[in-house]
Image (cartoon, helix red, strand yellow):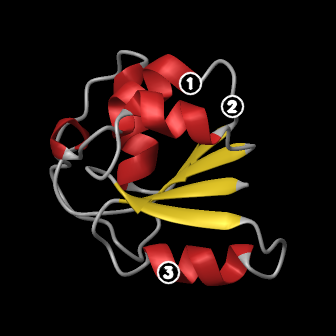
Amino acid sequence: MILLIDNYDSFSYNLYQYLGTLTDEIRVIRNDAMTVAEVAALAPSHIILSPGPGRPEDAGIIIETVQKLGGRIPILGVCLGHQAICAAYGAKIIHAKQLMHGKQS
């Protein structure tokens, strides 16, 4: 089962829809709906951390999930989810001087 952790972002369901073309075994939870121990007990084959608003440290269990499960379960992060993976391994997440959405940087 692929576990998609939703960081309160509507794009999560675009990811869900795409994953549905690959497998029927997908579960979606919000980032504050379970503990990391409960996530581990689900025994997902993969974890996807969705985009979302805000900063990784304010997004529920996502950093702790990476820290505790990242060595055992493949994890993909998209946008905020990617930032959470970086933060879990010690990266400093800072604001960009200029937003570059949709532009080459």
Tag 3 and tag 1, C-beta contact below 8 Å: no
Please determine whether, in this image, residue 9 is positioned above or below residue 34. below
The residue located at (45%, 19%) in the rendering is 67
> Which sits in the foreground, 34 or 19?
34
Residue, disc 1: 69
Please give the label number shown on residue 20.
Answer: none
Q: Give SS at disc 3.
A: helix
- Cα separation, mark 2 vs mark 3, equals 22 Å
Q: Would you identify the image quadrant in which residue 88 lies?
A: top left
The answer to whether 24 appears left or right of 36 in the picture is right
Residue, disc 3: 13
> Which sits in the foreground, 70 or 51?
70
- The number of numbered discs placed on residues in the rendered structure image is 3
Please determine whether, in this image, residue 19 is positioned above or below residue 52. below
The residue located at (70%, 36%) in the rendering is 74
Where residue 75 appears, x then y in whole percent?
A: 62, 40
Q: Amino acid at mark 3?
A: Tyr
Please give the label number shown on residue 73.
Answer: 2
Seen as rendered, the residue at the extreme right is 22
Q: Amino acid at mark 1?
A: Leu
Tag 2 and tag 1, C-beta contact below 8 Å: yes
Q: Would you identify the image quadrant in which residue 41 lies?
A: top right
> Which sits in the foreground, 39 or 56?
39
Where residue 55 appears, x then y in whole percent?
A: 19, 46
Q: Earlier in the sequence, mark 2 or mark 3?
A: 3
Please determine whether, in this image, residue 93 is positioned above or below residue 28. above
- Cα separation, mark 3 vs mark 1, equals 23 Å
Q: Could you tell me which quadrant the N terminus lies in?
A: bottom right
Where residue 85 appears, x then y in whole percent?
A: 45, 33
Q: Earlier in the sequence, mark 3 or mark 1?
A: 3
> Which sits in the foreground, 89 or 48?
48
The residue located at (75%, 43%) in the rendering is 45
